[in-house]
Image (tube, rainbow, N blue to C red):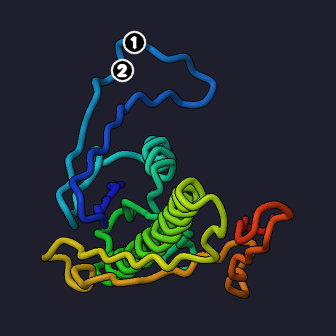
Amino acid sequence: MRLYVTNVTPQFQNFCYRLDFVPPGQKADKGDQQGFKRVRFSRGQQLPVGPDLPLEQLKPLIRQLEKLGAIYEIEVPRGLRNMVHPFVFNLDKNVSKRKAQDVVQHNREVRLGIGKDRRKTAAVAANVAISNMLEMNLGENPTQEVQVAIEQETSPGEGDMGSRIDEGYRVPTANDGSAPPPSRTRRSGGGRGTTRKAA
């Protein structure tokens, strides 16, 4: 039985493993241990991992792939989770192009969602920094809200992912809802014409 793995990320991926298989109830023999192995995947590449082996010997490799976020082809699309799946694997036959493309699209949507959340977080952080700066400089009447426009242009050559992302976020503060009242002045009880700001 052969294990076929497809890299469904836009990056190079390395998968490292050993083929030290010990049947249940037996002890490991150092003479049976094999050396470290590495498979390097280019973008979108599919390669066999390991030689032709019984399923019991392939199970440790499958568990290791699943810990890295790989998904079995028969679980696509129902088994897709809210995460980037770097690999799709299949047993005894190649991963179909359609299933690989389904996972690529899923990963793209997950990355876009992560990017949007990060831009929102950046907008909130910018609001805090601006509010602190204004309070330090003005002493009162802190900002009621801030609008942060974030523009990001992705690298070319990624199809739909190469489009521009242009978003703005409005981050209200606790006092949002009305503009701050204008500061009033009143005469002091002392000299004529002397004014001070209301507390």
Could you tell me if the residues under marks 2 and 1 are in contact, i.e. CB atoms within 8 Å?
yes
Q: Is residue 20 left or right of residue 134?
A: left
- Relative side of 51 to 116, left or right: left
Badge 1 crowding class, 10 Å Cα cut-off, few under 14, some 14 to 19, many 20 or more, is few
Q: Quadrant of residue 188?
A: bottom right
Q: Which residue is mark 2?
A: 33
Q: Tell me residue 138's x, y (percent).
A: 57, 61
Q: Quadrant location of the N terminus? A: bottom left
Q: Pinpoint residue 98: horizontal percent, then vertical percent.
A: 32, 84
Q: Is residue 86 left or right of residue 137?
A: left
Q: Which residue is mark 1?
A: 30
Amino acid type assigned to the residue bearing label 2 in the image: Gln
Front residue of 93 and 70 = 70
In the image, farthest residue toward the top: 30
| Secondary structure beneath label 2 | loop
**Height in image: 28 above or below 146?**
above
Q: Is residue 106 left or right of residue 51?
A: right
Which residue is found at the position 44% from the left and 41% from the top?
57
Quadrant in which the C terminus appears: bottom right
